[in-house]
Image (cartoon, rainbow, N blue to C red):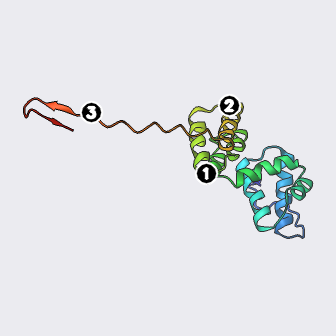
Amino acid sequence: TFEAKERGDLTIEAKILPGDKKRALLLNLATSHNKGKTHPGDVLAVIRALVEEEGVGSDEIAQATGMSRDQVERFWKIAEASPVLQLSISEGTIALGAAYEISRLPNHAQQEELVAAQVLYHRPVRDVRDQVERVLQAIANPAPPLPQSPAPAPAAPHPCRHARRRIA
């Protein structure tokens, strides 16, 4: 359609298929996936609509679109993540692999902290994965609390040279 507009075409041929929103979204996702040049932000939006609005599961999406179940579930994990992470995907400031790794963190504040670092430093996905693993491991196995230091001993009285008496 963009090419037709650039050529100045006033009409284009189209085929109208019967169906509902669910079918339209699945068809949109399937054709985009098969073309291979799909913007991750668009895929996130379609998968979110399919899951939240149409009640479609990852197996059905995978079967209808040609995507693997793992791909669908990774996109869904990102779709559930911090809005800052999703925006970074849509704007193209963070790679999809790094976004998935960051989305594995349990809360949005942690995710947003890593998004900021990733936008700034553009670390390899492997490094992001390692950092996320360390954080998840620290959450699962917190360090034991540090031992309490004993209360300080009371100060010994010292003489006051001017009053010639002891002050405690």
Badge 3 local density, few (<14 within 10 Å), some, or many (20+)?
few
Name the N-terminal-most of marks 2 and 3: 2
Name the N-terminal-most of marks 3 and 1: 1
Q: Is residue 135 left or right of residue 76?
A: left
**On the rendered image, what quadrant is the C terminus found in?**
top left
Task: Evaluate whether residue 7 shows in this view.
Answer: no
Pinpoint residue 15: horizontal percent, then vertical percent.
88, 63
Nearer-the-camera pick, 14 or 111: 111
Q: Rounded to the nearest whole Å, what is the CA distance between mark 2 and mark 1?
A: 20 Å
Q: Rounded to the nearest whole Å, what is the CA distance between mark 2 and mark 3?
A: 55 Å
Q: Residue at x 78, y 57 (%)?
A: 47
Please name the amino acid that badge 1 sits on.
His
Residue named by callout 1 = 108
Note whether 48 is above or below 73 in the view shown: below
Pinpoint residue 146: horizontal percent, then vertical percent.
54, 37
Nearer-the-camera pick, 4 or 99: 99
Badge 2 local density, few (<14 within 10 Å), some, or many (20+)?
few
Residue named by callout 3 = 156
